[in-house]
Every structure is written in structure tokens, then in C-alpha cells.
Amino acid sequence: MAMRIVRIKIQNFRCIREAEIFPSTHNVLLGPNNVGKTAVLEAINLALNPEIFARPGVIDENDFFNRLYLPSVVNEDESANNADPADANSDNPEQSEASQATADEEEANKKNVTSEDFPIIRIELVLAGLSSEDEDIFRENLVPWKSDERIVIESAEEGIDPFDGAETAIRVVFEGWYDPEEDTFDCKTFFLRAEGMHRDECQALTKTHKRHIGFLIYRDFRALTRPITLNPSQLFSRLMYSQEVKPKHFERALSTLKDALHPMTHDADFMSLLNSYKAELERFLVLSESQPSSLCFQVTDGTRDNIKSVAQMYLRDSAELPIQKSGAGTRSLAILAILTLIMRRRGRGILALEEPETFLFPHAQRRVIDECLALADQTFITTHSPYVLERIPVEGVGRIERDESGIVKWSPISTDTVKAINLYSKRLKQSCCEALLGRGVVIVEGDSDKWWLLGASRILNGKEWNGRQQEALELLGVSVVSADTNGGILRLGNFFNAAGLRVIGLFDNLSEDNPIWGSALNAPYPCVFLKETGLEQLLSNRLPICILREMLSSAQYAKTQLIEKTVVESMDEADVRKHAFEMLRANKGSAAMHEWVISLLDENTLPNVLKDLVDLVSQHMAGRVRIGMCSLAG
Amino acid sequence: MACVLWRGKAFTMSRFVPTKEQKALLDADVSALVIAGPGTGKTRTAIEKARLTVHTLPSESHKVLFLSFSNAAVFRLAESAKAELTRTERKRISFRTYHAFAAEILRSYGRFVGIPPIFRIMDTLEEKLLLIEEGVSPSRESYQEFLYKNAREGLLAFATLIPLATRLLTSSERLRRIVGRNYPLIIVDEFQDTSEEQWQFLRVVGQYSQVVAFGDPNQIIYAGMHEATEKRMDEFRDWKGVVPVAFSERHFRFGSPEILVFAKALLKGKKYHSKDDSGVYLYDLEFRTKDRHRLRTALAAIWKSIRNDGNSNETIGYFAFSNALAEEIAVTLRNPPSNAKVSFPVYARLTRDEAAYDAVLLALAALKDFAERHDTNSCRRCAVALIAMNSAWNKRADTSAKRLDKLEGFLKKSLGTNNKLGQLMTELTGAYSLDHFVPNLIEVFIGVDGFKSSCKRISAHGKLHLPTLPQVNSELPLFDQIRSNRVPKGLEGYDAGKGHTQVLNYHRTKGREFDHVVMLVDPRAESKKIKLDELRRLYYVCATRAKSTLVVLYYGKEKGRVLGPVI
């Protein structure tokens, strides 16, 4: 297996106070906004991007967790003035103890503040799976990585081979800190051979090392405005470096520039102006008498560097446009293509993609992701697009979670849960992907359950029910997925639950000897049972009779024969409900007909059961329903 | 003549034309054991081999490793490489002593044999100081315990480096393979002098590499090594499955081929028929070396005649059997008597372990601390420093606890008195530089029991250039400051080649070369215990150090065991 990141530890970085992540090959970081997805990607970027090198300005105070970059003792005063001091201290008992210390002690503490007391941004990556070429390059800094125990072996008993049963790995650490002497933020990236070594004792990770590791990052804002130039600090030059290509005739290009101004400067009017200026100048200044003198304009010495930034890449077809003035999609793809070409030529790479879907058509998203997955040894992806998510093996999909104290966790959905649902990779894939991108999911048995639940919530949108303002589930980020069978509901429920979503399972009425009943009782998410044995039963029982009559006589898109209006009018209520039940059953798969019926309803005619159901779902998604089982009575 | 561009300047070097055996070695990609006598082009072949290999190495991280047992040999190789290889080529070659290479491996992976990830190396002086402080005898079993206890705490003595690195590599197949890949070619110099410990180390380091070892059984000069070497050659053969090859004599080194003829006569104990102007000059002094005045005249006259020939840049080596004689020669050359025929002083450099100079500095610093502080701790420290100095300059010096107590008493008694030591201490109080106190120190301690011979040696070295003192801005005693800031001496190569005129004892000539060698034969200085064949090899090594002239000075009536049958 190729070199990849097997462990990420982050401390005090942006919204993350602490994180430990064990990534797999292709990783998708899901989660709501501001939970730390980008921070994880940025952390890897700080440690491994060759374009980032230790100098003041790489980090600033906003990169520190809670902007705490001074020792806690000094911060005490600030937090005392803070409107909510408990908030800052709640997660750290030591700190709150310190705040109770007497003034004398505080004074003493202040004097003893050493550089070790300053909070440090610390990002630690273990990269394992080194090839022999990698081992040679990092030979002085190898550590043994035991993948089954997920630890780095720090020492060994005599005579025991530390590398036995372990992979060779390197441990790379980025540290950022505030330097009070210089009043700047400083940082260093280094190899950590053994736990407990100070950064000053460790060998720095050089640009060459980083280039060898080959980490690449795609961020959409990168594609927005900057032109693609030959500037050495730009991505394109990294492409050239990766291919060991240098512009060959650069020197010649430079020398042709010397004459570039000729047509302009040798214009007769222009020359005569220059000459009169020279004559004027000679009134004050004695120019050489022996040598004839003249004034002229030339390109400067700075040309060498300027030209690299000034020469921009153009896209030529029917028109000619610099890349950065093209459409957003073109710009994004132009950057992505540099990344894929670097990996294609090197045959390796660790790739981070931050929302690669931005500005791209669905087919382009699929294509980009497929290529990236094929080329990269490891990927880290954040996305909001089901088209991106559906291309990625589900084993690497996981939700980022952050608790109140800033501890961030991420783990992929367990493989067992994934295996249980073969549905995922087939018909359900797209709806599952969409659900994964949301906050919660309701799993129902059939498609018609789905249409009716969504339809009901749409009708209730903006209306009040059970004393609460209702909102459409689609707007709440709640999806409804149909599972085809009752057993499927449980399996999908486990899957989504493992993925960290809020889940509700919706079942028809089941007999208590049904094994699924028992499993549903023990499910770690609420399961709801309908009183009726099916949706058709529910609808034919509970829809207002006038709606049912209209459906029987004039339903659109019905697959079955309609009944004459006069005949329907003549039926009694029981007969109408009986016929309606049969019609609904015969049109089970007809989305259009169901939608037509739903369109007849308003908040008053909608059965209360469905209104209660919508209310229950939104209550659960807001976290106000305890896990358990309930059955909806009529 | 090949022309090489280096730092923009063109300079020429003679083209290396290999012999048949050398060509075979250069072309082969298997290990080899080469028996190569002095001047057979061993160094040049080795460097050429390294150069050729460097160009075939797949990446920057792969290197050629030169291993040798002594700093001098490593230094000489690196110097030759400087003349013959380009800078980029040299960057791909590591010149290391066994000790330095072992330390390098331990720096990366020592934590897997129980030593801390960050450790310091203690050189011989630091080790001495610790031993004296802790009252450990270097000959007892407790010494091993002392070594490994310190190693676990992050202080590694030279003696622990190779065994620990060997253990580490023995336990880890993966690390052996990584080392093997990083150093696909290992060139071993002076293989005949490889100790058992070094040999075991080489076996794990070179398991997956091509190993080319150069050796010459005729140059074994250490007692009891001859048999061990024979065995080692067999073991090497079994290890890499190769038959030793011999380089034929080509006299690469010798401007005068006659030098090798004479050297061989010494080795075999055969009669040598001298020829005029052949590069070998045999002079009967007609007096014993004890007659320092006449000896000086002779030695200085030779120096003058070599220099008068306009060879001001050529190197001259004076060889004497013992250290004592070598030191006396240095002293007498430097101090011409008033009525001397050659009246100018000749400054000849004596080489000595650099740690020994530090020992003098530390002793002076400790004296200064004691003079300024008067407390028991600094008195103790002072006694330790003085005994360490004594032992650094005289191997046989007494380092026992009893001696330490006695010296401590003497120091205490002298403080504030008007005796010589008391005066020295008074002068040291508040002194900013310690260099010029060396003569006073010698003057005081030459009279102290057991310090005589070391003091004589220190003075033979003339003006000592002691390291500059640290900026005094700490409460710590000066002694502690200097001690904790010392760089361990003798691990990496040192500048053994500096100084145009040098005085060396016979054993130290190993691995060196001089344009002109003056070999002083004095059977009275020779140890009677040394076996005849061993002595002959030692003479052989000395004689073959000369590049253009070899002058042998002897007393006709006492030619000794080696020279006797030859002339």
C-alpha cells in the first residue's frame, strides 16, 4: 500500500481543541457547517503543503482554539472581564482552580511563565505504508507503526525487532506558537522520532521532503481570481517541478524582450521629445564630452521575476481569454487538472478536496471524483453534493462531530453496517447520498409512504399544528428514504444511525410475533408504527370522503379505470372507502397519481395522523424526542 | 592529464590508470577483500571505485560509505577525495569512523536499544572525569555497569557506541535492509586492524551491501592481532563468498622506488645494499640519542637541508619509537642551545588527542573556581580535574580514590598560602584568560607526586592553544560551564594532517604519509616485550610512510633487532 496518513492528531487549531482521527483510503468528512471539516483539511495542509514554510505569518491568533495564544495565567484577567467567564473555563477544571488561586500565587505564576506555558497549535500526522524509496529518503526518521493497535512503537526491549509486524512510517508534526519576544506567530514542521522530543531537537521537514510526500489541496477560492502564472510559489510551478520540467528557452525569451520597446522608442516624435529633454537636462548636468550620450527606455532587471508573474495562461479557442476570466467551471477544472496531472505523472499523491463540486455540472463532478480516486493514494473530501458522494466507497464516509468542549471526532461508518445494506450500492445510492448530506432521515417502507410524508410536510409548511409552527422536512435537511421491506428499514436505520444522522423508522402495523417487531424495539433510534396495516388502508380510512370521491371519479394519471362521477356520487361512504382502498392499492407505484391526490389536500383536510407524524419527525430532528418506540393511534 | 573544473578554477590532476587487478575491482559489483601493500594505489582505487559507484546510484539518498577505524585514516581519505572528486561526487560519499557511524545510527534508532532519543556522547576526557568522580576503576566489571548505566541515562561513552549499534541492527532485519539500501557500497580501509567489535558491526551494517575491504597483513602493528586478522580474512571470505585478491606493487606513493625495497628488507630481515641518491639515506649518528645536543644538531641540519632545497611546502615527519623520545625531540628542536650550529628553533607539531588539551583547560578552570569560592565542592572538583588531566597525559597515572583524597588535602592546605600553588591560585582569581597560566601550572605540579611525567609532556607540546572561555554570565562555576559546553573530541575526523613538520611515535605513523621521513632508530627506547616480527612490521609501516626521501638515523654500535641484519 502506498504512503498515506494513518493518524491525525490536532490540538488547539481553530474550532478544534482536540481531535484524533484514523483515516482510511478515501475519506469523506460530512457534517454541518462550522463543525471542523475545513479545519481538518487545513491542518493537513499546514503540515504537508510544500508551499507553506516556516515563517511568521503562516498562522495568526485566529488559528488558535478560542484565540487563546497566551498562557492561561495571563489570560485569567481577560476571562474575568469576559461576560461569561464560566464558558471559557468550564471544560478545564485546572484552569478554574487556578482562577481561585490567591492574588499572590497568581503574581508568582506570572513570573514563572516559560515558553512551555504558551498554548501551541499542534498537528501530528503519522504517514505509513512507505515504499523502499520513501524509507531511503526518510531513513533517519522512521518510526514503526502498528496498524492493528494504531500506535507508534516508541521503544523496544533489547533483541526485539521494533519493526517486526509493523509498517515503517514517519511522524510529522507542525507546531505554531506565539513568540512574545518578537511579537509574532512562529511555526515549525518537523519529524518526531520519539514522543517527548522538543521541536528544537528534531529534524525539520523540508520543502523537498514535502514535495516527495506529494500532498495536494484543492480549495474553490483558489480558482476564483488568481491567474495561472509561472510564479515559483504557484501551483503550476509545482507541476513543472513534479515533471522536472523547466522552461527551456527562458533566457532567450528574456533577451528578445530587450528589443521589444524598439518600435515605440524609435518613433520620430518620441525621439525628438527625448532629445529635447536631454538638451534641457544638459543645461544643468554636464554629460560626458568624450562619449556621445543619449537617453533611452529599456526593460529592467526586474523583468526576470516580473515576467513569471505577468505571463498568464490563456485559453484559446474561438475567443482568447485568460483562465481566470473564464467561467467559474472552467477555472475550477483548470486547477483540478493541474492536480490530477501532477498525480498522474508522479503515480502517487495525497489529495484533499474541499467541496470540489462547486461550479461543476453533475457529470463533471462525477468525472473529477472518479479520476481523483483512481490517481490518489488517499483522499480527504468535504462535499455537499450527492453526485460527489455517490462516487466514493461508503467505507470512507463519516461524520465529523464536535462536542461543546471542542473535542472533534470522525470515524467512518462501520463496515458491518455497510455490508448489511446491499441496497446502498444499487437503486438507493442517490437517495442515501442525499440523506447522508442532511441532518436526519426518516426511513419508510414504500415509495408511496415517502411521497405522502413529504407531501404532508409540504402542506403543513408555515402552519401551526400541536401548538408548534411546522416546517417542510426538505427545508429542515431531513430526507425520506424508502427501504422496500420492513427488514430494510432496520438495516438502513442502523446504517444512517452509524453515520451519525438522526433517524426515525416508520413501520406499518406489525404483529408482535414478527421478529422485526423485537428488533425494532431494541433499535437505537425511534421506530414508529402505524395503526393500519398499510398506507392504502390509512388513506382510505382517514381521507375526507369528498376527496376520495373525487379521486375515484377524476384522478389523473391513474393506471386503473375511473368510475363514473354519478356512480361515485351514488355510493355510500363504506363503499367509497372500499373502492378507494382498491384503487390506491392498484396504483401503488404511480407517483403522479399520488401527487395529484396530495395536491387536493390542505392543512384542514390532511389526516391528523399524518400531521402528527410530521410533527413527531421535526420534534425528533430538533432533539426533543427521547429514543424509544411509539405507535400512532388514529 | 585530466582537467577538472572546480569552483571556477581549472586545476589538473594526474590521470588514474588502473592496473589489471584494479580494473577488475572497479568493474565488479560484488564484494572483495583486497590485499594491498603500501603505495599500491589502494586509496586511489578506492576513491575511483566510489566515484564510479556514485554515478550509478539511483537517488540522492543513496551513498557510498567509507569506514575506517581511525580518525587519521578517515581524514586522509577525505583529503584525497577532495583533490580527486567533484563537490557533487563528494556529497554522495560518507567518510566515517566506525564510532561515528555507530553514533549516527543510534541517533536515529537508539531508542530501540534502551537509550533515550536524545543523547550526548562523552569523549575520553568526560569519561575520565565521571570515573574519577564516581570512584569507578576502568579495569573492573563495575566499569561495564558504569558505561551502560550512563548510556541508559543518555550519556554514551565511545566504548558503548559500536556494541549498542550492533545489537540494534542485529535485532532488526528491516533496519539492516534500510542501511544496506542507503549504502549499497561500503569501502573499508585498514581492514587488518579491524577489531572483533568493529568486525561484528561491519557484518550487520554490510549484510546487504557490496563491501570492498582493503587490508595489508604486513601492516599489523598491534600486539596479538596477527592471528586474529588471519581468521578475519577467512571469515570475510565465508561471509561474502569471495577470494582475497592482491594488488601488485606499483609504487604509486613512492617518488623513489628504493624506499619500498628498503622497507621490504626491514620486513624480511634481509640485507639491504644502499645506493647513492636513491631516496633512502642511512646515517650512522655515531652517538646515542641520549646525546640531545648532537641529536638536535643532526635533526635540525636535515630539516635545514630539505627546506634549503626549496621544498618549503613539503611535509617532514620525524619518527621516534616512544612518545617520550618524540616529545623530547620536539622540545629540543624548539629550543636551540646558545652555541648551536643550527641556531634557529624548529617548530615541530606533536599530535595528541584533542581532549587532552581540554583537560588542561578544565584543570585551570577548576583551580580558578576553587581559588574564588573556597568551598568543599570546588575543592573536590579541582582535585578531580587535576587527576583527569594527569591521566589524560599519562596513561599510567594513578586515578584511585586515595589519590583523589590526598590531592584534595594538598589543595586545601595550599589555599591562601604563599607556596607555589597558593600563589598560582591567587593569580588565577579574577583572571580573564587561562592560556598563559599553563607554564605556571606545569611548574607547580611537576614537583607534585605522580604528576611529573604528564607535566613534562604538556610542556613538550609548547604553547597550548586552549579553547576560548565561555562568556561568564552565569552563576555556575567556570569548570561546569566549560564542561557542559564541550564538544566531544575524537569522534569525527580531526586535522591530523596539519603542520608541515611533525613528530610522531612509530605507532602513530599508521595511515599517514610525508614527503620526507626522518626515522630515528633507538633500540633502547623499544620495548623488549615486543616480538621480532611485530617490530619488523612496525618498522615497515614507518618506512613506507615516506613519499620522496627516507632518512634513517641510527647508532652504528646499537642497530637493534630489526636494523641489525639489514645494514
Image: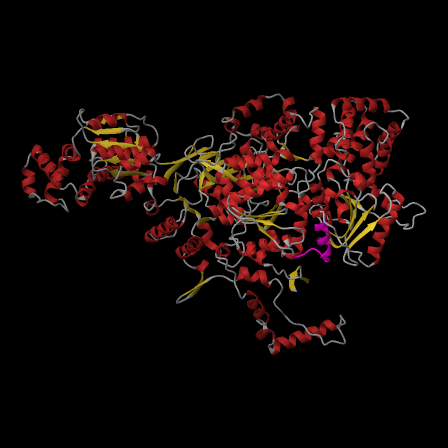
> How is the rendered protein coloured?
secondary structure
Viewer-nearest residue: B358 or A514: B358
Viewer-nearest residue: A297 or B65: B65
Tell me if I can see residue A451 in this picture. Answer: yes
- Quarter of the image for residue A488 reads top left
Viewer-nearest residue: B470 or A30: B470
Count of labels shown?
0
Viewer-nearest residue: B22 or A373: B22
Residue sticking out furthest to the bottom: A268
Q: Position of residue B121 (x, y in %)?
A: 65, 35
Q: Which residues are magenta?
A: B250-265
Residue at screen point 15% across, 40% down: A588
Q: In the picture, which quadrant includes the N terminus of chain B?
A: bottom right
Any magenta on residue B264? yes
Q: Is residue B294 above or below residue A537?
A: below
Q: Position of residue B352 (x, y in %)?
A: 75, 40
Any magenta on residue B552? no
Q: Position of residue B133 (x, y in %)?
A: 71, 25
- Quarter of the image for residue B291 reads top right
- Left or right, residue B132 beside residue B330: left
Tell me if I can see residue B432 in this picture. Answer: no
Residue at screen point 62% across, 65% down: A300
- Quarter of the image for residue A497 reads top left
Q: Position of residue B290 (x, y in %)?
A: 86, 41
